[in-house]
Amino acid sequence: MSSETKTDNPSPVLTRRKLLYGMGLAAAAVPLGQFLVACGAGTDGSGTDTTDPMDSVVDPGAWATGGTKAMTALSSYPDPFAAGLGTACALTCEATLGPCYATTVEREDITEGEAGLPVRLAFLIVDETCKPIPGATLDIWHCGPDGLYSGEDASDFCTTGDTRARSARWYRGVQTADANGRVNFNTCFPGWYSSRTVHIHFTVRLNNQEYVTSQFVFDDALDDEIINSQPLYNTRGSRDTTNATDNVVSAESAPEYSFQTKRMADGAMLAWKTIVIRSSLSNASCSVPGGGGGGGGPRPPGDGGMGPPPGGRDGGGMGPPPGWDGGTFP
């Protein structure tokens, strides 16, 4: 029996977006300039409106706080994937699992009411031909603003044995891609801990088989802005590791493994990324260039429902938790 716990959390209806902002792809897409002809900017040659809905988002000038309850304009967030991807997409490569995987929960909002800067994570799952993969499951996990992971079945390395963290299951969740390959999560911006840049882990499975496990990061300037100025994040001082010095997602690979982001009218962050999986497990996988690559201990089980037993896994590529006073992990 899977230990995933399902919660009824319907996805909000999103508006369509006309331009692709996805990174990490080698898409054979029509150049933007070809759309801005004949009928002028805002239409393509057929008269179709190509105005970018992101341009209509009014930036409030400050980030929201208080968790996902502050996402009051969620139903009007633009869809960053509406334009399509062309016909050739570059694989998302493997990065280490790390030691902090644990029991997951099937849900869209993964915060359990925790405070923090609210973030809408939007994903599109496709294969190398840019074909959407309906039915794929996306399992994500990340630390909270204080740098701690949750779960009594997670290693104390990840929770530091903190009673509150061990008794919670926040910032862990799994969702199934819809007919368009889309998956959404509502969460809070991750914190940091020593020797790792700010990051989010994920695993994609199809028919209970793992296709890719990897990590995505955020732009360094954005990380610094939030960590240095936002409530909860600005109480721990400056982080000691950036994308340029991380040992998993290197400076070389960070641009292609970074979320694109936009501040919404309610002050929440919309962050989006396309994940490209192999069309067959018999096809070769790849490792994130310049980083720790794949591996990192035993893989999550097929259904993603159960993490490691108490005591955790010996995953590589993860830095020590908050308060650890020296050294780095490979």
Image (spheres, rainbow, N blue to C red):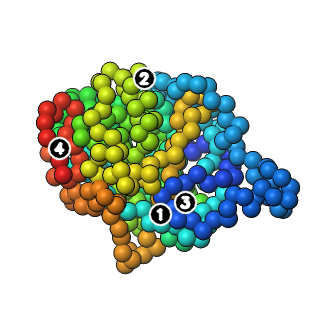
Q: Is residue 26 above or below residue 50?
A: below
Residue 324 falls in image quadrant? top left
Of tags 3 and 4, the one toward the viewer is 4
Query: Does residue 224 show up?
Result: yes
Q: Residues within 10 Å of mark 1 (few under 14, many from 20)?
A: many
The tag on residue 185 is none
Q: Position of residue 195 (x, y in %)?
A: 24, 41
Q: In terms of depth relative to the viewer, which is nearer, 107 or 326?
A: 326
Q: Are marks 3 and 4 in contact (CB under 8 Å)?
A: no
* Between discs 3 and 1, the one toward the N terminus: 3
Q: Identify the secondary structure beneath mark 2.
A: helix
- Disc 3 from disc 1: Cα separation: 11 Å
Mark 2 and mark 4 lie on one chain; the one further toward the N terminus is 2
| Labelled disc at residue 229 | 2
The Cα–Cα distance between marks 1 and 2, rounded to whole angstroms, is 34 Å
Left or right, residue 186 beside residue 296: right
**Position of 323 compared to 13: left or right?**
left
Mark 1 vs mark 2: in front: 2
Q: Residue 129 occupies which quadrant of the picture? A: bottom right
Q: Quadrant of the N terminus?
A: bottom left
Q: Which residue is mark 4?
A: 328
User: CB atoms at circles 3 and 1 under 8 Å apart?
Assistant: no
SS state under label 3: loop
Q: Residue at x 70, y 43 (%)?
A: 53
